[in-house]
């Protein structure tokens, strides 16, 4: 036997010994057969499907029967004032919120919002608002009562005029204008749409521009209680101008405080009754002398406009304020 | 001979920066040579018929509603345009066209005097421009969009600063 053969045999022997040792080790994992699960009960499947169907039906019923145009927020959450009427020729300049600003007619600074429109270099207006409900406006040169019933303080100097007030259950507001008359500013103050900060953010995205579809959409839609007719809301954009709209085919250029009625937009017999925001009740005298009295139900974001609907085709309308 | 090759190789290496500089300058001139800076105009009215790149400038040709090309303009320091009679009667229009790597928003306004516009986009908020007269009664305005810039809209003013109209490009 050569040396090479001896070394090979020794190697084979060693390998054989190792192999035997490994074979004697117990298996690392004991595998036991597990019986297959029994077939799922058909009753369980039926019960599961029934529960799912009930949940789906509940969701559908909720979506169908919910108030389709209920405003998302009440007056106290609407802390930003946005003009829905600006004089002809005025262009949107800028809008923003979150900064510490001074409101004309109020002492101190507030974390508020601004919307500014200009007409050339000669005229402009700024609507400022802040969520603070405590401050009262400083005494101005005189006061005016807005169509919402709020008492506003008016001040003028050589170039500017500003109107300041605390909106009941809402923000403090100041409207400052230059190159405008006091009557113009009161018109603007009577045509403000109060929105939530989230709504304001959507309005000011893209520099106040909106797609045609968004601009034409009735926003913040709302219906008087007890009716499915005539949703009122706001249409337009900060750039193209906002306007109060009723459904898809009727709109108000501005709130003037008139007491008037218009037909339901869906063609069915009925009237939309409109009046100044101080109106608490509408009285409609019919041709036979009977009087129908309907409480006003104002839109929470449009406090200068009272509105309701009534199933009637005509009559003489009277808007009664809270003191009448 | 080897010595001569080494010198030639060193000369070539020395030329690399120079050649690179020449190529860079040429490329830059090619990308901005259409002088968008002083005349940035896109067009919108009817359907865009074609985008053209000729004589070193980029332009747009579009159709009026009757299907005939009514206007062609070039983005460059000299613009050539012609308007059909149909367009002259049509008032204002605006649009967004894309081609050859350019995106241009344009507007045509029926006015005898130049008008001021304020341009709104994700990059510019109310930046003021003056229109370019293309006929006795038509003003043209156009903006080339920077990469990633989204157009929002245009405000058009008369000479007194009174707002004439607003066009929105959001959602187009």
Image (cartoon, helix red, strand yellow):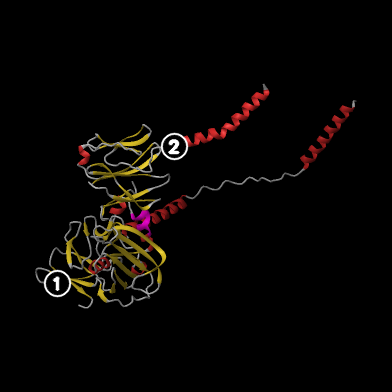
Q: Main secondary structure of the magenta part?
A: helix
Which structural element holds mark 2? helix
Q: Where residue A192 sits in the image (x, y, percent)?
A: 29, 65
* Residue to which mark 2 is pinned: B29
Residue B22 visible in the shown view: yes
Q: Is residue A166 above or below residue A63?
A: below
Chain letter of mark 2 equals B
Q: Is residue B80 above or below residue A197?
A: above
Q: Is residue B65 above or below residue A162?
A: above
In the image, A207 versus B126, the foreground residue is: B126
Please give the name of the residue rendered at 41% of the width and 45% of the height, measured from the top-left corner.
B146
Q: Which of pointers 2 and 1 indicates the residue nearer the eye? A: 2
Mark 2 touching mark 1, by CB under 8 A?
no
Chain letter of mark 1 equals A
Quadrant occupied by the N terminus of chain B: top right
Q: Which mark is residue A291?
A: 1
In the image, A153 versus A192, the foreground residue is: A153
To which quarter of the image does residue B4 belong? Answer: top right
Q: Is residue A173 above or below residue A211?
A: below
From mark 2 to mark 1, how far is it between C-alphas? 82 Å
For the residue carrying disc 1, how many other residues have a C-alpha within 10 Å: few (<14), some (14-19), or many (20+)?
Answer: some
Do marks 2 and 1 share a chain?
Answer: no
Q: Residue furthest left?
A: A288
Look at the image and give the residue range highlighted in magenta: A201-208
Residue A78 visible in the shown view: no
To which quarter of the image does residue A272 belong? Answer: bottom left
Q: Is residue B34 left or right of residue A192?
A: right
Q: Where residue A278 sits in the image (x, y, percent)?
A: 24, 72
Q: Which mark is residue A205?
A: none
């Amino acid at each position: 036997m050569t040396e090479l053969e001896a070394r090979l045999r020794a190697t084979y022997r060693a390998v054989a010994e190792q192999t035997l040792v490994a074979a004697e080790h117990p298996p690392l994992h004991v595998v036991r057969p597990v019986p297959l699960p029994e077939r799922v009960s058909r009753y369980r499947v039926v019960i599961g499907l029934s529960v799912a169907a009930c949940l789906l039906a509940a969701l559908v019923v909720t979506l169908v029967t919910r108030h389709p145009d209920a405003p998302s927020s009440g007056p106290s959450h609407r802390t930003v004032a946005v003009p829905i009427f600006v004089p002809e020729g005025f262009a949107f300049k800028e809008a923003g919120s979150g900064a510490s600003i001074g409101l004309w007619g109020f002492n101190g600074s507030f974390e508020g919002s601004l919307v500014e429109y200009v007409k050339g270099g000669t005229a402009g207006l700024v609507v400022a608002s802040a969520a603070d409900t405590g401050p009262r406006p400083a005494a101005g040169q005189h006061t005016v009562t807005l169509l919402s019933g709020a008492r506003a303080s008016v001040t003028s100097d050589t170039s500017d005029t500003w109107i300041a007030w605390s909106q009941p259950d809402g923000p403090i507001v100041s409207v400052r204008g230059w190159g405008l008359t006091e009557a113009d500013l009161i018109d603007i103050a009577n045509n403000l749409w109060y929105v939530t900060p989230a709504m304001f953010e959507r309005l000011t995205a893209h520099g106040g521009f909106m797609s045609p579809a968004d601009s034409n959409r009735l926003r913040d839609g709302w219906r008087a209680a007890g009716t499915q007719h005539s949703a009122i809301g706001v249409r337009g954009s900060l750039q193209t101008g906002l306007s109060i709209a009723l459904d898809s085919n009727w709109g108000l250029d501005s709130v003037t405080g008139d007491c008037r009625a218009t037909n339901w937009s869906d063609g069915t017999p009925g009237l939309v009754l409109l009046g100044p925001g101080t109106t608490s009740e509408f009285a409609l005298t019919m041709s036979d002398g009977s009087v129908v009295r309907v409480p006003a139900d104002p839109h929470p974001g449009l406090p200068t406009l009272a509105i309701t609907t009534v199933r009637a085709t005509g009559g003489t309308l009277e808007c009664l304020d809270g003191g009448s | 001979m080897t010595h001569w090759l080494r010198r030639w190789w060193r000369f070539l290496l020395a030329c690399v920066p120079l050649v690179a500089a020449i190529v860079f300058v040429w490329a830059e001139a090619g990308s901005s040579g259409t002088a968008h800076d002083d005349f940035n105009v896109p067009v919108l009215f009817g359907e865009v018929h074609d985008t053209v790149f000729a004589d070193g400038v980029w332009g747009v040709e579009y159709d009026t509603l009757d299907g005939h090309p009514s206007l062609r303009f070039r983005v460059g320091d000299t613009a050539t345009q012609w308007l059909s009679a149909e367009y002259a009667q049509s008032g204002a229009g605006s649009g967004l066209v894309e081609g050859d790597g350019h995106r241009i928003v344009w507007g045509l306004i029926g006015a005898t005097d130049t008008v001021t516009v304020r341009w709104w986009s994700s990059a510019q908020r109310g930046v003021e421009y003056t229109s370019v007269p293309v006929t006795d009664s038509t003003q043209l305005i156009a903006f080339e969009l920077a990469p990633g810039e989204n157009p929002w809209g245009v405000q058009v003013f008369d000479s007194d600063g009174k707002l004439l109209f607003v066009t929105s490009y959001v959602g187009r």
